[in-house]
Image: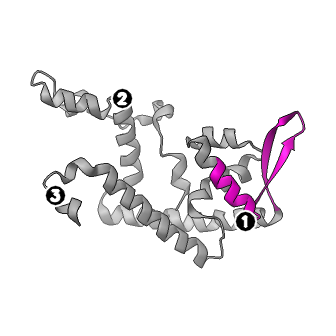
Amino acid sequence: MYLDDHPLAGAFLAHQLTRLADLITDQGEAFLRGNGIEVPSRAVSTVLLIGDQGPISAAAIAEQLQQPHQVTTQRVELLIKAGITDRTTDPEDGRRKLLTLTPHGREQYDSLQSRLKTAAAAFEALFEDIGCDLAAVADRAAMALELEPLSVRASALEDAASPAPAARFSDLSDWAEWPHLTTRKAARHDP
């Protein structure tokens, strides 16, 4: 691939991670279909949240999954068309719509529970194979970039008087104290 061999390949981390995310999504889709699950792989966390906390609004889903509202709305529409979720009017606020699982959606939710345990074990085996807990590293990278954005890091490298990046953030292992920075935590449910 052109970017893989490019002398500046390290600058294309987002491209590499997008390719990885797409690969995981495609393989997750095949895994789900092969197990009789109709939920699109990118909507698994949405179904889990509705199943765990429903009735719930699309705005609450977007907030809890740290997704743009538009993305959540698109996924909800797919789930409604697939007969997995229903949208009803909130009896306490007629302007607000609430989402619940249909009986078919509840069956899919129950099937997801056991299949996701298998997917989680498969990811653990992958992490063992590559010698790295990729999910934890992604969380740490997101936290580090929230604390010090890429633009600041780049400027610091141009300024010889700045300390090295490792000296500024030598221990990011306790990211739990930064819950607003764990942007990928909810997405871990999606195979």
The Cα atoms of the two marked residues, 2 and 1, are separated by 40 Å
**Region in magenta:** 73-102
The Cα atoms of the two marked residues, 1 and 3, are separated by 43 Å
SS class of the residue under badge 1? loop
Foreground of the two, 33 or 14? 14
Q: Mark 3 against mark 2, which lies toward the viewer?
A: 3
Q: For the view shown, which residue lies furthest in the bottom direction? A: 34
Foreground of the two, 188 or 127? 188
Amino acid at the residue labelled 3 = His
Q: Mark 2 against mark 1, which lies toward the viewer?
A: 1
Residue beneath the point at 38% across and 47% down = 138
Amino acid at the residue labelled 2 = Leu
Residue that numbered label 2 is attached to: 147
First in sequence: mark 3 vs mark 2: 3
First in sequence: mark 2 vs mark 1: 1
Q: Is residue 99 magenta?
A: yes
Residue 169 appears in the rendering: no
Residue 132: horizontal and vertical position, in percent?
A: 32, 56
Residue 123: horizontal and vertical position, in percent?
A: 44, 63
The label number, if any, that marks residue 82 in the structure image: 1
